[in-house]
Image (cartoon, helix red, strand yellow):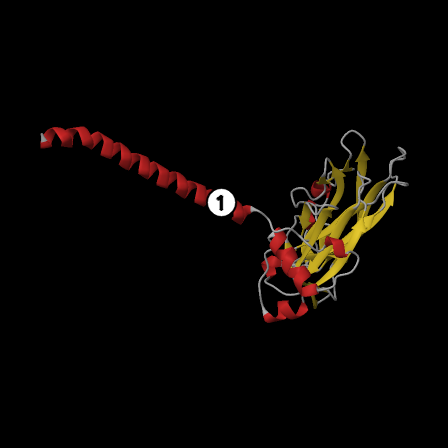
Amino acid sequence: MKNILTLLLAPLLSCSCIQKQETEKENAIQYTDKRNSKFKTPIKFEYLSDYPEIKDSAKFITNLRGAFDLKISESPVQQEGEKITAFKKVKINGSNQDYYFIEYDWKAGSTAEYPWKYQLILTKEGKLVKTLEAQRYEFVSIFPKENPFLLATIVTGQGNGGHDIYKVTADTLENVYEGYYDYDLRTYDAHEDSKIYEPNELKLTVKDFNNDGFNDFAFSGKIVLIQGLTPQGDWYDAETINGKEVNYSVDHPFKKIPVEYIFLYDKKTGHFKEKENYTEKYHLFK
C-alpha cells in the first residue's frame, strides 16, 4: 500500500516542484526586467524650465550628465573648471521649432577625449536630438530668410579635423556637408607634422559660386608646408641651398599654397557636394 501511495504522489510532487521552479524563474525574470527597465530609463532633465537662468550650476551639470549619460574623466582640475558655456533657445534650418542648445565644457581630460566639450540639442519637451563633441560651433546663415545651419568644428587632440553642417530632417539632425563624411578632406589642421593650414581652421565663405540661385560655401586659406616636398611626394626637413643648410619649420616654411574647397548646393539631395575631387587634386599634401 505504501508503495502504491508513493507511486501516486510522486507525479504530483514532481509537478508541484516544477511549478514552483517555474514560478520562481518567472519572478526572477520579472525582477530582472524591472531592474533593467529602471537602469535603462533615462533620468528626466529637470532644468529646462529654469531657462534662461541656471540657478544651481552644480546640480544642472550633475543632472545633465546623468540624464544623457555624458562620459568624462573625473579630476580636480575638471571639477574646478567645468561649466555650462551655452544655454539658449535656437532655431535650426529645416524646422520652425524652438530647440534648446546646451554646451558643457569640462576643461580637462585625456588627448583622446579632446575637445572636452559636449553640445546637446534638445526639443522643448527635453528630448535629446543630438549630442556633439565639437571644438567650436556656429549658427551659420546660408540661405536668405531661412533659419541658420549648425556648424560644428570637429578636432582631434593632435590638431587634425574638419566640419559638420547640420539641418533638421524628420526630427533628427542631418549632416548635409559631405566633405568630411569619411574624415577625408581636412578643413582644420594645426598638427605640425609636414604641414598646417593658415589659418588653422580654414575660412568659411557663403556665396552662390555656380550662379544657380542657391548659395554654396567654400573653405579657404593656405597650405603651409613646414617640411620640404619633392615632386614625387617625399618629405624632407632640410636641404643645402648655395652651400648653406636650410631647415624648414613653422617659422620658416618651405612653401605656402593657396587653397579653396568649394561645395555646391545640390537641390535633389539638399546636400553640399564638392565642386571637384579635392582629395585627388591635393593628394601630395596628405
Q: Residue at x 81, y 45 (%)?
A: 91
Q: Nearer the viewer, residue 82 or 143?
A: 82
Q: Residue at x 52, y 49 (%)?
A: 39
Relative vertical location of residue 158 with respect to residue 44 in this rendering, above or below: below
- Please state the horizontal and vertical placement of residue 224, each as a whole percent of the image: 75, 57
* Residue 34 in view here: yes
- Please state the horizontal and vertical placement of residue 132, each as a whole percent of the image: 68, 50
Secondary element type, mark 1: helix
Residue, far front: 1
Residue that carries the numbered disc 1 in the rendered image: 34
Q: Nearer the viewer, residue 278 or 93?
A: 93
* Circle 1 crowding by C-alpha within 10 Å: few under 14, some 14–19, many from 20: few
- Res 192 → quadrant: bottom right
For this view, does 73 lie left or right of residue 211?
left
Relative vertical location of residue 248 with respect to residue 69 in this rendering, above or below: below
- Please state the horizontal and vertical placement of residue 209, each as a whole percent of the image: 87, 39
- Res 16 → quadrant: top left
Report how many numbered discs are placed on residues in the image.
Answer: 1
For the N terminus, give its image quadrant.
top left
* Residue 200 in view here: no
Amino acid type at circle 1 is: Lys
- Please state the horizontal and vertical placement of residue 165, each as a whole percent of the image: 75, 44
For this view, does 25 lie left or right of residue 211?
left
For this view, does 171 lie left or right of residue 31?
right
